[in-house]
Image: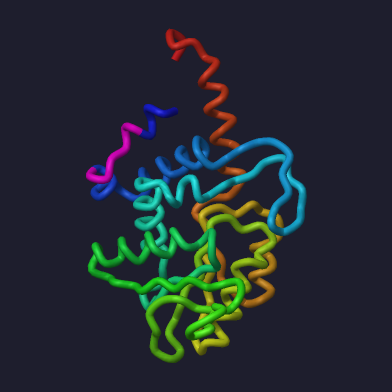
Amino acid sequence: MTNQIKSLNSSSLAITNLTTIRQELLGLLCILAYRQGDFVLSSGQSSSYYINGKYVTLHPLGALMIGRLILSMLPEDTQGVAGLTLGADPIVTAVSVVSAYENRPIPALIIRKQAKGHGTMSYIEGPRLDANAKVVVLEDVVTTGASAMMAVHRLRQAGYQVNHIFSLVDRQQGGREFYEKEGIQFKSIFTISELQENLKEATVLAHIPHDKM
């Protein structure tokens, strides 16, 4: 597994097609972010597994892959990307940095859970966008959908248009359905089903003798 990570490099990822990058990112998530056990999620739900997306979103190659993939998903008229701190912080930053390299600069905004206690006392950090600017909300892992929706409300209160939410992983526990009811278009790079199927296949392959492969 460690060798798989070391085999990746920024130069190859800069020219690799998106299908291959998506597969590499799936492997990185399974290796670094997915854990089994007894966990309580931010939603208050209990779970037999946990995905700590920050192990990948803060990984240099993980951030580069995420930036390229999400940038390719954004509507052409996107004027900003934003997300609720802390999970979305490295994602919006990665997308913004990659967008500059691809000659499509898109500013990043970070949404506070509570208003800043001094200075501007604001909920939103980042460049000030034009009124009615079209902003896409980004998230690392979606469960019920409440966290990203908080960001949507703050951005709309600031006068921005928000009609899309994109995530790294959809846990398939009601988030998509919640967004649809709210009139928000939702896309995820992966579903939890894909991660778990990939892990299952990797476990099977690990137990097959090399001379049988």
Residue at 40% across, 84% down? 128
Q: Which residues are magenta?
A: 6-11
Residue 201 lies, in percent from the top left, at 55, 29
Q: How is the image coloured?
A: rainbow
Residue 39 in the figure: left or right of residue 71: right
Near-viewer residue (164 or 155): 155
Q: Determine if the magenta segment contains residue 90.
A: no
Residue 43: quarter of image: bottom right
Query: Where on the picture, by quarter, is residue 180?
Result: bottom right
Figure quadrant of the N terminus: top left
Q: Position of residue 50 (x, y in %)?
A: 64, 44
Residue 38 image offset from top left, x and y in percent:
73, 39
**Near-viewer residue (86 or 8):** 86
The answer to whether residue 176 is left or right of residue 2 is right
62 left or right of 101?
right
In the rendered view, tell whether residue 136 sits above or below residue 166.
Answer: below
Give percent across and percent down for residue 91: 44, 60
The question of residue 8 being in magenta is answered with yes
| Residue at x-position 69% and y-position 61% | 144
Q: Is residue 108 left or right of residue 104?
A: right
Is residue 115 positioned above or below 101 on the image? below
Image quadrant of residue 127?
bottom left
Tally the numbered discs: 0
Identified at 66% across, 76% down, the residue is 182
Query: Quarter holding the C terminus?
Result: top left
Q: Residue at x 54, y 35 (%)?
A: 198
Q: In the current view of this chain or complex, which residue is farthest to the front?
A: 118
